[in-house]
């Protein structure tokens, strides 16, 4: 997340926002990106994998536990994450340019 946060902060000039608001905005951005990742993960998992994910989610896993689970089942997880980050940045940039 640090590298992703730095990249997103640069793109959206978040360094100009007070820290408390920046942290809140970054949390929302993480949630949006994570949702996109999970949609793709679910599309790739077998029925057994989805059941295992369901069981894990019931236990409220830490981010580290979730990362281990996903990396064991999705060989190109890092690429998937970066793709979702790029997708978020592109869709956000498009929305912002439409407002201008």
Image (tube, rainbow, N blue to C red):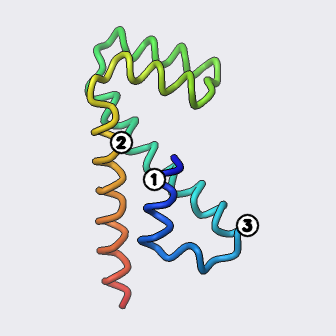
95 vs 39: above or below: below
Q: Nearer the viewer, mark 1 or mark 2?
A: 1
Q: Nearer the viewer, residue 40 or 81?
A: 81
55 vs 26: above or below: above
User: x, y percentage for residue 87?
Assistant: 29, 56
The residue positioned 53% from the left and 13% from the top of the image is 55
Q: Is residue 51 left or right of residue 91?
A: right
The residue positioned 43% from the left and 12% from the top of the image is 51
User: x, y percentage for residue 57?
Assistant: 56, 22
User: x, y percentage for residue 9?
Assistant: 50, 67
Alpha carbon distance from label 2 to label 3? 25 Å
**Are dots 3 and 1 in contact, CB under 8 Å?**
no
Among numbered discs 2 and 3, the one appearing first in the sequence: 3
The tag on residue 20 is: 3
**Are dots 1 and 2 in contact, CB under 8 Å?**
yes
User: x, y percentage for residue 82?
Assistant: 32, 46
Q: Is residue 30 left or right of residue 97?
A: right
Q: Quadrant of residue 76?
A: top left
Quadrant occupied by the C terminus: bottom left
């Amino acid at each position: 997340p640090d590298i992703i946060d730095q990249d997103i902060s640069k793109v959206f000039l978040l360094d100009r926002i007070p820290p408390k608001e920046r942290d809140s905005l970054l949390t929302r951005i993480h949630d949006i990106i994570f949702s996109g990742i999970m949609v793709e993960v679910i599309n790739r998992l077998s029925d057994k994998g989805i059941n295992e994910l369901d069981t894990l989610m019931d236990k409220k896993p830490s981010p580290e536990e979730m990362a281990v689970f996903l990396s064991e089942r999705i060989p190109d997880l890092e690429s998937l994450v970066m793709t979702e980050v790029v997708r978020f940045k592109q869709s956000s940039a498009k929305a912002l340019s439409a407002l201008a």
